[in-house]
């Protein structure tokens, strides 16, 4: 089973002519969010699929109401919010349950992502921060796919040390996603995030310069 709780699988939006659409992906623990934040600080329009997946099942939404109808009231915490850990235990143990959850979450995520992209400027660099580009064969829908890459041993260490998982839990989450080799096979550009934050800053700076160059060339059109 190669998926994760409420991992968004967006349909491919059209975008504006001249807009550069970038798919940003990486395995769990790769530090993809660090890259995403740095690109946003540079001026990219970042559309975070995981963040939207949380928003569409926030308290008071029709998404959460539908999840509760499908899985029962026990998946809600005392505050009425989704107990993601409990729901994760259910769907990771049963692929059919995961399919049910995705059928609720994904259409809502897709609609919101389309709205955000439509609001971006015609010459924008729009970065879709999507964990499951490889798993769901979405690479062809972007002008460029950027993969944040680290060795599996680094992923495992970060998940145990920084997220409090056991080694077994971390290994299971990693196994639920595509392999490192499969992700690298779809990469147009790779950011190696196994080093220092200073090195990451340098790489993201170089990446942003290249994205801007491509966006400008795309806006200008054929010579």
Image: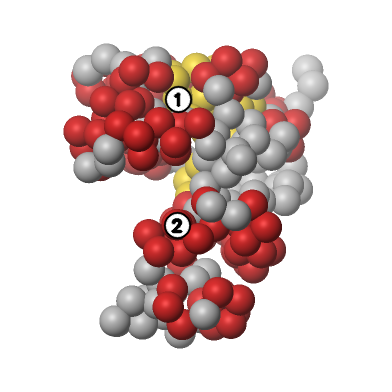
Residue at (76% x, 27% y) in the render? 221
At which x and y percent is residue 46? 48, 46
Residue at (79% x, 21% y) in the render? 222
Say which mark, if any, is on residue 72.
none
Which of the two residues, 206 or 140, is positioned nearer the viewer here?
A: 140
User: Quadrant where the C terminus lies?
Assistant: top right
At which x and y percent is residue 66? 59, 79
Q: Distance between the residues labelled 1 and 2?
A: 27 Å
Q: What element carries label 1?
A: strand
Q: What element carries label 2?
A: helix
Q: In the drawing, does residue 117 fall left or right of residue 82?
A: right
Dot 1, how many residues are within 10 Å of its Cα: few (below 14), some (14-19), or many (20+)? many
Q: Residue furthest right?
A: 222
Residue at (46% x, 57% y) in the render? 88
Q: In the rendered image, which residue does mark 1 sit on?
A: 148
Dot 2, how many residues are within 10 Å of its Cα: few (below 14), some (14-19), or many (20+)? few
At which x and y percent is residue 99? 67, 57
**In this rendering, is residue 223 above or below 175?**
above
Q: In the drawing, does residue 14 fall left or right of residue 115?
A: right
Residue at (52% x, 19% y) in the render? 180
Q: In the drawing, does residue 210 fall left or right of residue 160?
A: right
Q: In the rendered image, which residue does mark 2 sit on?
A: 89
Which of the two residues, 56 or 115, is positioned nearer the viewer here?
A: 56
**In this rendering, is residue 70 above or below 177?**
below
User: Quadrant where the N terminus lies?
Assistant: top right
Which of the two residues, 108 or 141, is positioned nearer the viewer here?
A: 108
**In this rendering, is residue 69 above or below 93?**
below
Tell me whether circle 1 and circle 2 mark residues in contact (CB < 8 Å): no
**Within the image, what quadrant is residue 142 found in?**
top right
**Within the image, what quadrant is residue 75 found in?**
bottom left
């Amino acid at each position: 089973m190669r998926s994760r709780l409420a991992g968004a699988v967006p349909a491919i939006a059209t975008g504006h002519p001249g807009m550069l659409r970038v798919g940003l992906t990486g395995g769990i623990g790769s530090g993809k969010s660090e890259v995403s934040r740095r690109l946003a600080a540079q001026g990219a329009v970042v559309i975070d699929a995981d963040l939207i997946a949380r928003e569409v099942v926030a308290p008071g939404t029709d998404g959460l109401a539908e999840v509760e109808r499908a899985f029962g009231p026990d998946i809600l915490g005392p505050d009425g919010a989704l107990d993601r850990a409990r729901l994760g235990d259910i769907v990771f143990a049963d692929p059919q349950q995961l399919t049910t959850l995705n059928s609720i979450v994904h259409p809502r995520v897709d609609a919101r992502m389309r709205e955000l992209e439509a609001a971006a400027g015609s010459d924008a660099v729009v970065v879709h921060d999507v964990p499951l580009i490889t798993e769901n064969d979405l690479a062809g829908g972007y002008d460029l796919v950027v993969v944040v890459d680290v060795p599996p041993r680094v992923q495992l260490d970060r998940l145990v040390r920084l997220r409090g998982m056991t080694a077994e839990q971390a290994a299971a989450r990693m196994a639920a996603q595509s392999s490192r080799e499969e992700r690298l096979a779809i990469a147009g550009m790779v950011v190696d995030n196994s080093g220092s934050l200073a090195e990451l800053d340098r790489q993201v700076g170089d990446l942003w310069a290249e994205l801007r160059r491509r966006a400008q060339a795309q806006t200008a059109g054929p010579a």
